[in-house]
Structure formats: structure tokens, C-alpha cells
RNA sequence: GCGCUUAUAGCUCAGGCGGAUAGAGCGAUGGAUUCCUAAUCCGUAGGCCGCAGGUUCGAGUCCUGCUAAGCGCACCA
């Protein structure tokens, strides 16, 4: 499909080229008309009134004939206090409908390659334990955003940053050792800030079964701990990957921090900082003069004990991303990382990277409810806290939909009971039902020998005159421009709302207008709407990563 | 104290580039089924769009200030 609004804007500016000055042309932007006012609306006369000191309706009257000449446009009406309402021509609508019908739903909203590589980095939870239910929101947002960006023609890589280096990893290893080593006849103290989850002794057991003899053969404790760390990490990552796959989320790259450090990227980025003259030494540590780049304090890059800080590694990681040829990295973090935005952007600046290279998206906290009651997430209460359990309880599609129920900027209430309920109050279920209902109509048509067209003619469109027909049409045609906007503004949740709007329009249409009927021409026209709605719903579902069934 | 986010119907939330009468779901309430999935749909009630200024022909939307809530402000990640 193509972006109808942009196409109309272009046609309008050509049509009005002799009537508008260069400064006035940008004011001639159209927007989707509200119900009952045609298809697209121009507020141009009101904007022009100021510049020209003429009444809007007079200007509207003067512009109207030129707009009427636009090929896409069937009719134009001036409306008080100064709107120009466009109605698309039957021929153009028929053309668009045909395009929707013959497209593969997977490419229906695809705009064609732009030759730019973008990376979306999301989830990236430490591999020190299974994914928490809260990680689900990042997973849903990231995977949908990645698909959204693909519709815009970007080559998108989904990346999970594995923080398998540093003090958290050490704590993780020692926590396992505390349970594992006694099985082999040694003692190991639980670190003070050690991990307490029940998965730790489970990991100890699993590693014992895998590697007991190997561990026995080792001479030094350091050697054993290194093996425990490696085995523990592999097991945890496998469980993380499994949980994400069950939610329909997959990654192109699992990028290891350990790899980054081992391969000298910290040294490389430190050298880069040095050559730019933005570092200094104080109290035995190496500091970045990040306040020169908008940060509110300078940051330590290398600690007094010689260890790199996460700041340095973050810089190295993004420096590495840049070297890998991405033109942009979109990092999706939870709200607890909100303070990272300013320092991270200062890092990018201090490395001389393009201002728009790094985008950081923050999603707010999720409150889980069960039947309206706030759920306290803890092992003690027996309430689920692992993402994998949540997905199994409510189902993959329901989980994805419920995580997208509000904008990333807003806190989210996720009602576990509502999510798994098989009723039309459940938005996931409503979408599925609507699609199945459309399929049922098509099946009925085939069964009764009614025509199921795959192309539309102007005469077909001329019959689609009721409010419900036109509103559904509008809902379908705005898909591309809405998806473009959603991608541009990085708003994954809007795809869900768009799908919901189509579903609502479909059901209203279905309730009000009979599709299959005696009048063969009318049946054919309505069937076009049914088929096109199926296509658009499938296209949205593909971006959302949910499945729409043929029957229910 | 500073930074980011949020504040819209009883509840949970949308609201596009500043445009016409403020939108949905749930809840409340009234109605629609000789007919393609009523597993649906339609109507009604319910709004100082946090508060106060400002810009504009026009502000839920932009600007300033204030209030409240969430998150964050390490030589942890």
C-alpha cells in the first residue's frame, strides 16, 4: 500500500501551485476527516486567513475548483468555519482496494528498502536469573517496534545484550557455588548480596549432574568458579531464550559483554577518548569530562582498582555498534534506567558519534492484577514472577496484546484474569473473533456460490455509500499512513489500537449491513470490504506478532 | 535539591502535524436476533482534559510557573 495522506498532500500542492506562495504551500497538509465529513480534510483556508487577511470561507471558495481537478478526488466541499473536505473518487478507491486485495498481507504495509541498518536492542536482562514478568513489556514493545521499523524499509537487527561480565556475574557464580560445592565436599559462603531465588539451587543441581567429575578434577577454586559461571550462564540464557520464544520474540544477535571486554573494545574506546582529550585522572581513577557534553557530573571510566566501569563498557558497546555499520541504535530500557539517558547521550557526543545515532526508549512499570486486585510479586505468596509462567498462563497472543495496552510512557495495568478470559472484553480475543467472523462470511460465500472478487471496479465502489461502508473504507486506507506515523514516533502500542479500530469498524459494518444478499452487485461490493478488512487485519497482526484464526 | 515520565468519564486507557460536537473498553442503564459467527451491535447518562497564566482566529495538544504521583541521581549493572 502507499501513504495516502502523503500522496494527497503532494497532489494538493501541485493543484494549488499557482494559487499559493512558497511559504503557504506547507500549510496545505490534509488530515483524515472526521466521521461524516468525507475522507480527508484541509484546514488550509483558516491558516491562510491570517496571512492574507481574508475570510476563510472566501478563500475556501477560491481554492475549491483547483482541488476538484485532482485525479484522486471525487468531490470537494467547503464547510464552515473554513474546511475543505475531500472525498476520494470511486476510481481511485477501486484502485486502492484492488491493491490491498492482491498484496501479500506480510508486505501490505511495507514501503520498500531504504538501505539503512538499524539495531533495536531490548530486554537485555542480566543472565543471572530467569526473565521476570516485567521484562515482558520490553519484549513486546521491542519486537513490535522492530517489525514496525521493517515496514519502513530499514534493515532491522534485534539484539540482546548479555551482561555476562562484572560484579553481578560474580555474585551469581558464587551464589551457585554456595549450593554446588557442598555436593562435591567443599564449602563456599553465600555472598552477602547473593541471589536468593530458588533457581539458584536448581542450577547448582543441574551443574552438578553435568560436570561433577570435571569439577573434581580441577585443581584451583578459581578454575572451578570459572566453569560454574560458564555453565550457569549457558543454562540461564537457554531459559531466557525459551521464555522469549514462547512469547514469539526472537533475536538476531546475542551480544556478549564478555566478548566485548576480551576483544579489547574497552581499550579501544578508552584510546578514542584519550585521543579526543576528554579524559583526566583523579584519585587514581580515569574520568571522562562528560559535563562538557551535557552530563550533570563527570563519570569514572576506569576505577582506582583498574577495573572498567559499566560506563566505559557501555561506551565501548555503542562504539562497537557504530563500527558494525548501524546508522542507529534504539535501546529499550525499563523506567529504572531512566537516569541513563543523559549520561549515555553524553558518551555518544564525547565519542563524536552522530547526535541521532542512539535513541533510548523508556517504558514505565507494569502493575499486575488478578481480578482487579493488585498482585504482590514474590515467591512467598506463590504468585508467578517468571515471564515464562505468565505466558503459559494467559497465552502468547494475550500476553503480547496486554503488554501493548498502553503507551510505553504510561504505567500499565496487566490483569492476568482479564488476559486469559475467552470473552470479547479481551482485546486479543476480540481481534481473533472479528477475523474469524470475516473468514466465516467468505466461507459462506464460497458455499453458496457467491462471488468473492479479487479486484475492484469503480462501479463496485459506487455502491458503498452508507456511513458504515465509508468509515470502514477509511479505516482500511489510513493503515499505511498510521503505520508510518507509529514507526516514526516509535509507538508500538498504536498498532494494537489501529487493529482494534478496524475490528470495531468491521463489526459495526457487519451488524448494520448485509454482505451476502440477493443483489449480486451489492454482495460483490460488500465482499470487497470483507476481503480487504481481512488483509489489513492480517497485516497488523503480523506486526503485532499475533495469530488470527480462520475459525473459532 | 536536580533530571526524566505521568495527570483526560466511576475504573483502565487512547487522542495523529494545533482544527469542526472530547474517544474506546469496562462498569451503570435502555434497546436490537425470521438474516452471513448476538462470541455482535446501537442508544442514554457520565468530562473545569491536575491548577494558574501565556502564544494563537482556534489549545487536551505548544510555552512558562505551580501541585501531586512514579522512576532515577555510585569508582553497582
Image (spheres, coloured by chain):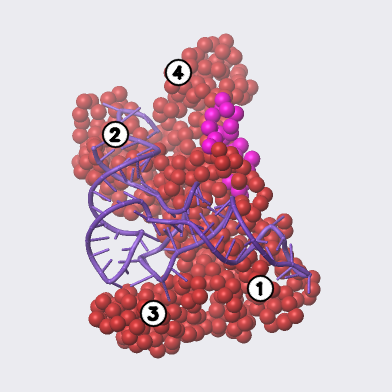
Mark nearer the N terminus (3 vs 2): 3
Q: Which mark is residue A301?
A: 2
Contact, CB < 8 Å: mark 3 with mark 2?
Answer: no
Instruction: Indicate the position of residue A517 as horizontal and vertical percent values.
Output: 73, 77
Tell me which chain appears purple: B
Q: Residue at x 32, y 77 (%)?
A: A46
* Badge 4 element: loop
Residue plotted at (62% across, 72% down): A529
**Is any atom of residue A502 visible in this view?**
yes
Please give the residue where the numbered disc 4 appears in the rendered image.
A191
Q: Which mark is residue A513?
A: 1
Q: Nearer the viewer, residue A497 or A18?
A: A497
Q: How far is the residue under mark 4 from the one under mark 3?
A: 74 Å
Pointer 2: residues within 10 angstroms few (<14), some, or many (20+)? many
Q: Is residue A340 left or right of residue A450?
A: left
| Residue A80's disc number | 3
Judge the density around disc 4: few (<14), some (14-19), many (≥20) Cα neighbours within 10 Å: some
Amino acid at each position: 500500500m502507499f501513504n495516502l495522506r502523503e500522496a494527497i498532500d503532494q497532489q494538493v500542492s501541485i493543484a494549488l501551485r499557482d494559487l499559493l506562495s512558497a511559504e503557504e504551500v506547507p500549510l496545505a497538509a490534509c488530515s483524515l476527516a472526521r466521521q461524516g465529513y468525507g475522507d480527508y480534510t484541509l484546514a488550509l483556508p483558516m491558516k491562510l486567513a491570517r496571512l492574507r487577511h481574508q475570510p476563510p470561507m472566501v478563500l475556501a471558495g477560491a481554492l475549491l475548483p483547483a482541488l476538484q481537478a485532482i485525479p484522486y478526488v471525487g468531490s470537494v466541499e467547503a464547510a464552515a468555519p473554513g474546511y475543505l473536505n475531500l472525498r476520494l473518487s470511486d476510481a481511485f478507491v477501486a484502485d486502492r482496494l484492488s491493491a490491498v486485495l492482491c498484496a501479500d498481507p506480510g508486505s501490505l504495509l511495507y514501503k520498500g528498502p531504504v538501505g539503512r541498518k538499524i539495531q533495536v536492542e531490548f530486554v537485555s536482562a542480566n543472565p543471572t536469573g530467569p526473565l521476570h514478568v516485567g521484562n515482558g513489556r520490553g519484549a513486546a514493545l521491542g519486537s513490535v517496534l522492530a517489525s514496525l521499523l521493517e515496514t519502513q524499509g530499514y534493515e532491522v537487527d534485534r539484539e540482546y545484550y548479555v551482561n555476562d561480565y562484572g560484579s553481578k556475574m560474580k555474585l551469581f557464580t558464587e551464589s551457585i557455588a554456595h549450593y554446588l560445592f557442598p555436593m562435591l565436599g567443599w564449602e563456599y559462603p553465600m555472598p552477602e548480596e547473593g541471589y536468593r531465588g530458588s533457581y539458584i539451587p536448581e542450577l547448582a543441581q543441574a551443574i552438578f549432574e553435568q560436570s561433577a567429575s570435571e569439577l573434581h578434577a580441577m585443581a584451583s577454586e578459581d578454575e572451578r568458579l570459572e566453569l560454574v559461571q560458564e555453565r550457569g550462564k549457558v543454562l540461564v540464557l537457554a531459559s531466557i531464550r525459551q521464555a522469549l520464544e514462547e512469547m514469539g520474540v526472537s533475536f538476531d544477535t546475542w551480544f556478549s559483554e564478555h566478548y566485548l571486554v576480551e576483544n579489547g573494545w574497552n581499550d579501544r574506546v578508552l584510546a578514542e577518548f584519550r585521543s579526543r582529550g576528554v579524559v583526566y585522572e583523579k584519585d587514581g581513577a580515569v574520568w571522562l569530562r562528560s559535563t562538557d557534553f551535557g552530563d550533570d557530573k563527570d563519570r569514572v571510566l576506569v576505577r582506582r582498582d583498574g577495573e572498567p566501569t559499566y560506563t566505559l563498557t557501555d561506551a565501548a558497546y555503542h562504539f562497537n555498534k557504530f563500527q558494525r555499520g548501524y546508522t542507529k541504535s534504539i535501546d529499550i530500557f525499563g523506567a529504572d534506567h531512566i537516569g541513563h539517558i543523559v549520561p549515555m547521550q553524553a558518551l555518544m557526543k564525547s565519542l563524536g558519534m552522530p547526535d541521532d545515532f542512539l535513541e533510548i526508549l523508556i517504558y514505565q512499570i507494569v502493575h499486575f492484577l488478578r481480578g482487579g486486585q493488585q498482585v504482590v510479586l514474590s515467591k512467598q505468596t506463590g504468585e508467578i514472577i517468571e515471564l515464562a509462567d505468565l505466558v503459559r498462563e494467559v497465552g502468547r497472543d494475550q500476553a503480547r496484546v496486554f503488554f501493548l495496552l498502553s503507551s510505553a510512557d504510561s504505567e500499565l495495568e496487566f490483569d492476568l484474569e482479564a488476559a486469559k478470559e475467552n470473552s470479547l472484553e479481551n482485546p486479543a480475543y476480540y481481534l481473533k473473533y472479528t477475523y474469524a467472523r470475516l473468514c466465516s462470511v467468505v466461507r459462506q460465500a464460497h458455499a453458496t456460490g457467491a462471488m468473492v472478487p479479487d479486484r475492484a471496479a469503480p462501479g463496485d465502489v459506487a455502491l458503498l455509500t452508507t456511513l458504515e461502508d465509508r468509515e470502514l473504507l477509511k479505516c482500511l486506507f489510513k493503515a499505511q499512513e498510521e503505520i508510518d506515523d507509529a514507526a516514526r514516533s516509535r509507538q508500538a502500542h498504536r498498532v494494537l489500537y489501529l487493529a482494534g479500530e478496524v475490528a470495531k469498524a468491521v463489526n459495526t459494518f457487519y451488524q448494520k449491513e448485509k454482505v451476502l444478499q440477493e443483489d449480486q452487485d451489492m454482495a460483490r461490493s460488500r465482499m470487497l470490504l470483507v476481503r480487504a478488512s481481512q488483509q489489513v487485519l492480517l497485516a497488523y497482526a503480523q506486526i503485532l506478532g499475533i495469530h488470527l484464526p480462520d475459525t473459532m
